[in-house]
């Protein structure tokens, strides 16, 4: 497959996983052990939004609990029973359930797999430029540079 010849359709589970498991700086990157993302939207050349097939091993988390300033996010549970953690508390999820996270609300969210089985879900997010993310539970903040790359800072503004 080349950039000139994109697939018409694929089996999602056969998509290659991301080569870099996390863009977080340490010590946060290591906390993403047990999470595997298989980018799907990129395979079709999608640029306005991203789609990942994500797998969480037992005990794994989807991300640090975070909230985006400009990016809407949506998840749809395919397998397993992860727990959604938001500012409102914990919500058990099951296959067929979904959740959405509107940009700019400040409501931090992530999934935790407290079960003994793998959890599998689709995550969809827009790619609004100039995004930023806050992390209510950790000493980290993220800002998106004009080139689309993320810069991570301590909450006092010093870089990682």
Image (cartoon, rainbow, N blue to C red):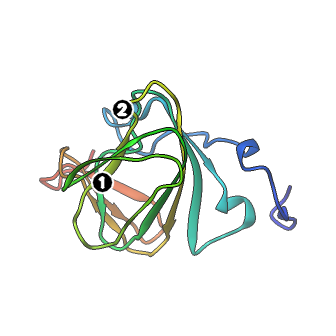
Q: Position of residue 122 (x, y in %)?
A: 56, 54
Q: Residue 148: x and y, percent?
A: 47, 66
For the image, the number of numbered tags is: 2
Name the one closer to the observer, 120 or 18: 120
Mark 1: few/some/many CA within 10 Å (<14, 14-19, 20+): many
Q: Quadrant of residue 112?
A: top left
Disc nearest the viewer among 1 and 2: 1
- Do the numbered discs 1 and 2 sit on residues whose CB atoms are within 8 Å? no
Q: CA distance from mark 1 to mark 2?
A: 16 Å
Residue 88 at x, y = what percent? 19, 56
Q: Furthest-left residue in view?
A: 156
Q: Quadrant of residue 105?
A: bottom left
Residue with the mark numbered 1: 109
What residue is shown at x 51% (from left), y 38% (from top)?
Answer: 80
Q: Residue 6, labelled with which disc?
A: none
Q: Secondary structure at mark 1?
A: strand
- Residue in the foreground of this view, choosing between 144 and 18: 18
CA neighbours of label 2 inside 10 A, class few (<14), some (14 to 19), many (20+): some
Q: Locate residue 84 relative to residue 86 in the image: left or right.
A: right
Eyeballing the image, is 88 above or below 146?
Answer: above
Residue, disc 2 = 31
What residue is at 58 percent from the left and 54 percent from the top? 52
- In this rendering, is residue 88 above or below 128? above
Question: In what quadrant of the picture does the C terminus appear?
Answer: top left
């Amino acid at each position: 497959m080349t950039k000139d010849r994109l697939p018409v359709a694929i089996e999602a589970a056969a998509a290659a996983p991301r080569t870099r498991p996390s863009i977080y700086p340490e010590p946060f990157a290591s906390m993403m052990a047990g999470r595997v993302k298989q980018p799907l939207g990129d395979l079709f050349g999608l640029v306005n939004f991203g789609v990942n097939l994500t797998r969480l091993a037992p005990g794994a988390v989807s991300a640090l609990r975070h909230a985006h300033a400009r990016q809407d996010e949506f998840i749809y549970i395919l397998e397993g029973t992860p727990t959604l953690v938001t500012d409102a508390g914990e919500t058990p999820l099951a296959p067929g359930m979904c959740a959405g996270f509107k940009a700019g609300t400040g409501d931090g969210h992530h999934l935790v797999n407290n079960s003994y089985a793998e959890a599998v879900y689709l995550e969809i997010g827009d790619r609004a430029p100039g995004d930023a993310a806050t992390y209510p539970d950790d000493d980290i903040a993220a800002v998106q540079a004009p080139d689309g790359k993320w810069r991570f800072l301590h909450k006092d503004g010093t870089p990682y």
